[in-house]
Image (cartoon, helix red, strand yellow):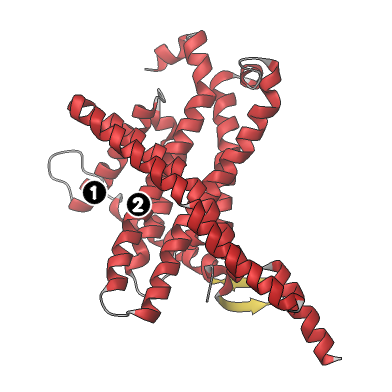
Amino acid sequence: MRLTPDAWIFWQYGFFKLNATIVFTWALMAVLVLGAALITRRLATGHERSRWQNLLEIVVTGIVGQIEDVGLKEPRRYLGFLGTLFLFVAASALATVVPGYEPPTASLSTTAALALCVLVAVPLFGISGQGLMAYLKSYMQPTPIMLPFNLISEVSRTLALAVRLFGNMMSGAMIIAILLAITPFVFPIVMTVLGLLTGMVQAYIFTILAAVYIAAATRSAASSKPKPSSTAAT
Amino acid sequence: MDSLTWIAVASIVMAGLTTGFGTMGPALAEGRAVAVALTSLAQQPDASATITRTLFVGLAMIESTAIYCFVVSMILIFANPFWNAAIAAATQAAGK
């Protein structure tokens, strides 16, 4: 029984293994990038617009609204990172309707990579929002005794992000595989629908948690000293 | 019983117990969370977007502990290092 798509190897050359995780990730990247490029070729600003452009606008506006709800003041700044996270994880879950496909997020490698991206992005956004010293000082809040606990919480948050997404996607794939062996008629379809629902919820959760961590890293500057540049920008 | 049987029995029993006990706590906690969320939705329906979003985030955090238990069970069943090492040693002993 295959635990992760890492074990499904398409092609091997010495040390380099082309497994299903990499191939399906490339396929998802191709679909997302080519689809976006094709749809945004001729953007219309009037009332006449293609339904694909409408769809993309709904998605982008929805993500911007959610980022703003979390408390980030300039959502467009974080839209690239957070939007990509959401679209990749959501597309990886939605493509389960294609037969023979296994979500690459069902492999711990992919989810660990995404969690590491968040681990790197949170200090980057924090430093670019607050400055280096203010961000480093935020680790000492509320007292310097909390410094090791804050550091540990950074690491454990990243680990939890990776394992949460991995566990959800892997359990969905595994339940479908087991049910296909037992009752292969109607029940696997019901479980596939459930897997789609949990996949979308997990994509939303991943993005919202990343947004909350970034908001926590950039928050103290906005509350303590209002930056004059932000009012000039808006 | 030889050590191979001991490893198998321990792995199987603990895999079942881990998921069995590990999902009880999160299930109770999630039930409470949803109940309180429904109460506050009934009291303030126009805050439903915030309440729903916070509810989902909270449910995901609670679910994480159940998923940790599930991952440990899967490791015990499918990627058990003790079992793999014992099988490798037994194959070597049988091959000699």
**Residue plotted at (51% across, 9% down):** A224
Is residue A84 at all visible to an observer of this figure?
no
Residue farthest left in this picture: A47
Rendered residue at 29%/38% (across/down): A62
Look at the numbered disc 1 and give the secondary structure of its residue: helix
Quarter of the rendering occupied by the C terminus of chain A: top left
The tag earlier along the polypeptide, 2 or 1, is: 1
Amino acid type of the residue that numbered disc 1 sits on in the rendered structure: Leu
10 Å neighbourhood of mark 1: few (<14), some, or many (≥20)?
A: few
Residue A165 in view here = yes
Question: Image height check: is A199 above or below A95?
Answer: above
What subunit carries mark 1? A
Q: Are marks 2 and 1 in contact (CB under 8 Å)?
A: no
Question: Dot 1 corresponds to which residue?
Answer: A55
Q: How many marks?
A: 2
Q: What residue sits right under mark 2 in the picture? A: A200
Query: Percent from the top left, x then y, of residue B9?
Result: 64, 72
Left/right placement of residue A106 relative to residue B76 reads left
The disc labelled 2 sits on which kind of residue? Met
Report the front residue among A167 and A69: A167
Image quarter for residue A80? top left
- The residue depicted at 34 percent of the width and 42 percent of the height is B31
The percent coordinates of residue B84 (x first, y second) are 71, 74
> For the residues marked 2 and 1, what is the alpha-carbon distance in whole angstroms?
17 Å
User: What residue occupies the far right of the structure in this picture?
Assistant: B96
**Which is closer to the viewer, label 2 or label 1?**
2
